[in-house]
């Protein structure tokens, strides 16, 4: 994939509801702005995006993990924003199993489903990347998200492909469900 630029976003949360934390919650998103080879035309075959997404996924997921500053990633999510000359399907093609498996390998995630969001938009768009535990979807403490504003991207013939990771659960989480330290199986329930 032809990369125009890579954007990095880091959010560090030190307290929530007036309660400071001993270990700040860090969320990181890495966004690669790539050329959309299908912009302005329809194609049944989107294999160029699907096949190319693996290498891109490894590249940006590795950068995301590195940006956690030594903390191990506990949750992740993915997303894509397609420029106005493309289709939402082009973004989905960038986030299939090929990309998801590259993220899992880079982050050290299990076989759990990786949450995602795709949309079509002009430069300056916002996107909310959903987060869930990397090993078990039903660990509610890690349901979270990160909002990104994409300045100067995507141009009409581009796609922004995003990997987002965090180093822990929401601060003050207390809604119950399976805990991260008791994960059994692929979904946290078995």
Image (tube, rainbow, N blue to C red):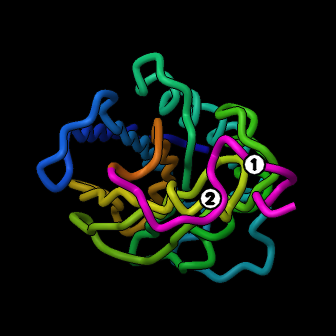
Q: Quadrant of the C terminus?
A: bottom right
Q: Nearer the viewer, residue 85 or 149?
A: 149
Q: Count up the numbered dots.
A: 2
Query: CB atoms at circles 2 and 1 under 8 Å apart?
Result: yes
**Residue 32, how many percent across, how many down?**
46, 44
- SS type, badge 1: loop
Residue for point 56% across, 49% down: 76
Residue for point 49% across, 62% down: 143
Q: Quadrant of the N terminus?
A: top right
Q: Quadrant of residue 87?
A: bottom right
The circle on residue 39 is none
Give the magenta-colored segment's residue range: 172-190
The circle on residue 183 is 1
**Residue 82, how many percent across, how many down?**
46, 69
Q: Quadrant of residue 137?
A: bottom right
- The furthest residue to the left: 18
Residue named by callout 2: 139
Residue for point 83% across, 50% down: 184
Residue for point 37% across, 66% down: 128
Q: Nearer the viewer, residue 63 or 23?
A: 23
Q: Say whether disc 2 or disc 1 marks the residue closer to the N-terminus.
A: 2
- Residue count near mark 1 (Cα–Cα under 10 Å), binned few <14, some 14–19, many ≥20: some
């Amino acid at each position: 994939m032809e990369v125009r630029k890579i954007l990095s976003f880091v959010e560090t949360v030190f307290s929530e509801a007036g309660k400071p934390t001993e270990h700040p919650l860090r969320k990181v998103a890495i966004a690669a702005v790539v050329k959309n080879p299908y912009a302005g035309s329809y194609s049944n075959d989107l294999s160029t995006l699907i096949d190319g997404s693996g290498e891109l996924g490894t590249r940006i997921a590795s950068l995301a993990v590195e940006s956690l500053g030594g903390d191990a990633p506990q949750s992740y999510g993915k997303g894509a924003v397609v420029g106005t000359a493309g289709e939402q399907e082009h973004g989905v093609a960038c986030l299939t199993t090929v990309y998801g498996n590259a993220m899992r390998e880079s982050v050290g995630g299990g076989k759990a489903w990786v949450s995602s969001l795709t949309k079509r938009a002009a430069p300056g768009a916002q996107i909310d990347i959903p987060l869930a535990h990397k090993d078990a979807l039903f660990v509610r403490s890690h349901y979270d998200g990160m909002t990104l504003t994409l300045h100067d991207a995507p141009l009409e013939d581009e796609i922004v492909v995003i990997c987002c990771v965090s180093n822990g659960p929401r601060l003050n989480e207390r809604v119950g469900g399976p805990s991260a330290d008791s994960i059994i199986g692929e979904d946290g329930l078995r």
